[in-house]
Amino acid sequence: RDKLSRDFILTFLSRIGITFLAAITSVVLARLLGASEYGRFVFAYSIIFLTLLPAKFGLDGAAVKFVAEYTAVRDFKRLVGFINASRRYLAFSTLVGIVLILLVIGLKIVPLDDRGSLLALAALPSFALLAQLHLDGQVLNGLKQTAIASFPEGGLRAFILVLLLAIVYVAKFPLSADIALLMNGFAVLCALIFSRRWIRWYCKRYDLPRVGVAEPKRWIFTGASHLLISCSHVILSQTDLFMLGILQNSASVGLYSAALQLSSFLLFFGNAINPVVTPRMATAFSTGDRSELFRIAHLGVNLSFALTLPLFLLFLIFGDSLIVILFGREFSQSSLIFLFLLLGQLAKVVSSPIGFVFTMTERERIASFIIGLSALLNLILNLMLIPQFGAVGAACATCLSAWVWNGTLIYIVWRDYGELLLPSFTFFRRK
């Protein structure tokens, strides 16, 4: 319990710095690029995350489970086998993805103008490297290095990108979304080098073997389940941006993204708590200790909600002013968008970390089915609401689907386990 508290404090402090850097990065990009170019950058980045899904095949999500499990039982041959096999697969899949993207651009399969083609080419370095960086982050989570797991992407990458943006600004070099994406690719490369070195240093204590043992069937099955969950998560988080970019314009994407960035601060405490509790939930499940698994889940729910509630009230009262102060008056039209997104983020806070109850207990198919239906609902609502209400409609669709998704997960856990994972009700048991 003392180690759990210590890990939470360290992760919490790490998240403060990472969140601060992420906020600075978003604000600097929005102010230097303007609403339209910032919208292009965000739209391209959302495409990167969508195309990364098949490339990663859910292995980044499965890494937390397998690394924590193999480390707990000291099965280091399978640990090495999983990490090495995952890295090789990601290298191959991203290479195939790059070749396909170049063919699409070269053969003009998708009608892109010169700026669109340039934007796609500028995004390739980030696409190639982010898959490996995401895997490393989850490996670190599985090793219970939760305080450092998000630092390479969320901290170091953001710091280097802000530094490069500052150099461009001082040098008065013209900045566009294409150049910003290239700078981001360089920042991701630096972050990946750091994460690889940290994993190598940390694993020296285990005296790992050079050659690992593989159990590909189990990895593929779990990876496929996590792929479905990841697809649904990304659809829920990126469909709005993608649909706005197609059905509206880049300015709408910029306004929406500014509101989304600010509302995402509501997930700060949950994002600090979940990396601490999830590996321990996986360990408890692997040792058959169900009571410990749900004790940790209850602790995560209570802590997340109690710490987030004051921040939610602050944003609810002063959100309009914060958007203008941070992003500028050009983004003042984001107020109503921000309100809907804030309510949607609250749904994730209320049920955090309930999704991991499914993924850590090998019930990924149930979670993927529920989240998949929510993603489909999100897509339908976006198609219905964006043409008439624009970015406000996209925010409303995201809010509704988030409550449907999390509410259903809460009900199923209560039905199957007798555990009502809600704040203030976390010690209630169904008789």
Image: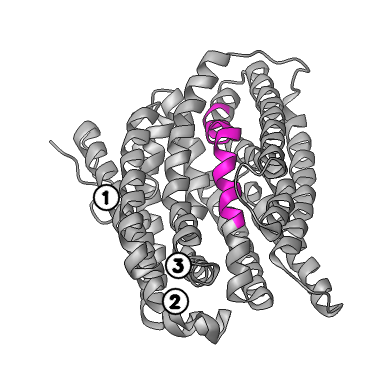
From which residue to which does the magenta span run?
Answer: 44-66
Please name the residue shown 43% across and 32% down the image: 360
Give left or right: position of 383 versus 76: left
Q: Image quarter for residue 174? A: bottom right
Which residue is more in the foreground, 45 or 290?
Answer: 45
**Are there few (<14), some (14-19), or many (20+) residues within 10 Å of tag 1?**
some
What x and y, as percent, mark residue 154? 64, 56
Of the residues tagged 2 and 1, which is closer to the observer?
2
Instruction: Identify the residue under disc 3.
Output: 263
The image shows residue 323 at horizontal and vertical percentages of 50, 79
Proximity of marks 2 and 1: CB atoms separated by less than 8 Å: no
Disc 2 residue type (three-letter): Ser
Measured as percent of width and height from the top left, residue 248 is found at: 46, 65
Is the stretch drawn in magenta largely helix, strand or loop? helix
In space, the residues marked 1 and 3 are separated at their CA atoms by: 19 Å
The residue that disc 1 covers is 404
Does 32 sit above or below residue 144? below
Q: Mark 2 — residue?
A: 334
Residue at 66% across / 57% down in the picture?
113
Residue flagged by tag 3: what amino acid is it?
Ser
